[in-house]
Image (spheres, rainbow, N blue to C red):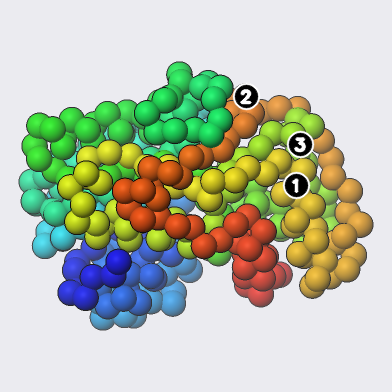
Amino acid sequence: MKESTQNTILITGGAGFIGSNLCEYFLGLGHKVICLDNFSTGHHHNLKDFISDSNFKLIEGDIRNFEDCSLAVVGVDYVLHQAALGSVPRSINDPITTNEVNVSGFLNMLVASRDAKVKRFVYAASSSTYGDSKGLPKVEDVIGKPLSPYAITKYVNELYAEIFSKTYGLETIGLRYFNVFGRKQDPQGAYAAVIPKFVMQLMKYESPIINGDGDYSRDFTYIDNVIQMNELAMTTQNPEAINTVYNTAFGERNTLNNLVEYLKKYLSEFDAKIADIEIVYGVNRVGDIPHSLASIEKANTILGYSPNYSLQEGLKEAVGWYWNNLK
């Protein structure tokens, strides 16, 4: 459902991969969008297509600074909170900074949103919350123990959101993202996500290194499915839909071996030599969950979520974007 009225939407982390796609989408619907970002992981080039839009406002600030949060929420109807330090390995290497951003920063945003009386606070939760739970598919009310500092911070977000709903009446909805990928996802840096990293390596005729034997599986989720979920969470009028969490995924798992074969196939349509690149296998990564698969039944039943892009369909789109923009 798309609202006909113009709203003011604050997107924290709006210069990042998911955040910038959300900014672009909601500006396209005619809403006013405020982006709060400190550019620690976001990029100015992610904003170039709409930075001059009269409905767009950029605030360069840090969610660890409460004054920045308070300034950003002035006059805001909805908050889509995407700002966080992602990456399990980063959290293992630097748990203090991960906690400061993902927990203290999250709490700052909750308090600022409560004080500004925003209508709803929709936030990026994580599939890492399922931790060591063995059951597949993952259902929202059955989780295990976290396997990394990052996973702990994202679970604490859910606990804080629930308390703010019950104690202060702030409407909150958490979206447990499962391995999101797509246009604008950064292929650079030590903590680059696997899909853009592999794409860039293959385009340079380098062999991607898979951690383990390649049989670990993930529910890879294309960015447009995530945009759909954010819109549904922001606009739903169903009282039962509020103050809870939803899996945000496609509802299908693919192994890393599957993933690389798809990437080679789609990239070889641009350059036939890529089809012959060999894959290298390394050791399993500490803190990684072996298998991940989401049940999207709750989101479908309560929010009407129906993802449009499978892994293969999303990869075709993403590979074309990377080839045209980063080759």
On the image, which quarter does residue 293 sit in? top right
Q: Is residue 225 visible?
A: yes
Look at the numbered discs 1 and 2 and tell me whether their residues touch, using CB distance below 8 Å: no
What amino acid is at disc 1?
A: Asn
Q: Secondary structure at mark 3?
A: loop
Where residue 4 appears, x then y in whole percent? 21, 75
Image quadrant where one finds the C terminus:
bottom right
Tags 2 and 3 touching, CB below 8 Å: no
Give the residue displayed 13% in from the left and 53% down from the top. 118
Residue matched to label 2: 286
Q: Which residue is mark 1?
A: 258
State which tag comes first along the sequence, 2 or 3: 3
Residue 103 in the image: above or below residue 312: above
Residue 309: give x, y in percent of width and height: 56, 61
Label annotation for residue 214? 3
- Of tags 1 and 3, the one toward the viewer is 1
The three-letter amino acid code for the residue at tag 2 is Val
- Check disc 3 and give the amino acid type: Gly
> In the figure, 193 relative to 288: above or below?
below
- Expressed as whole percent of the image width and height from the top left, the position of residue 90 reads 52, 34
Q: Residue at x 51, y 39 (%)?
A: 294
Residue name at image x 72 percent, y 49 percent: 259
What element does badge 2 sit on?
loop
- Whether residue 261 sits left or right of residue 277 in the image: it is left
What is the distance, in whole Å, between disc 1 and disc 3 at their CAs? Answer: 8 Å
Spatial distance from mark 2 to mark 3, Cα to Cα?
Answer: 15 Å
Q: Which mark identifies residue 208?
A: none
Given this view, does label 1 or label 2 mark the residue nearer the observer?
1
Q: Describe residue 88's horizontal placement relative to residue 245 as left or right.
A: right
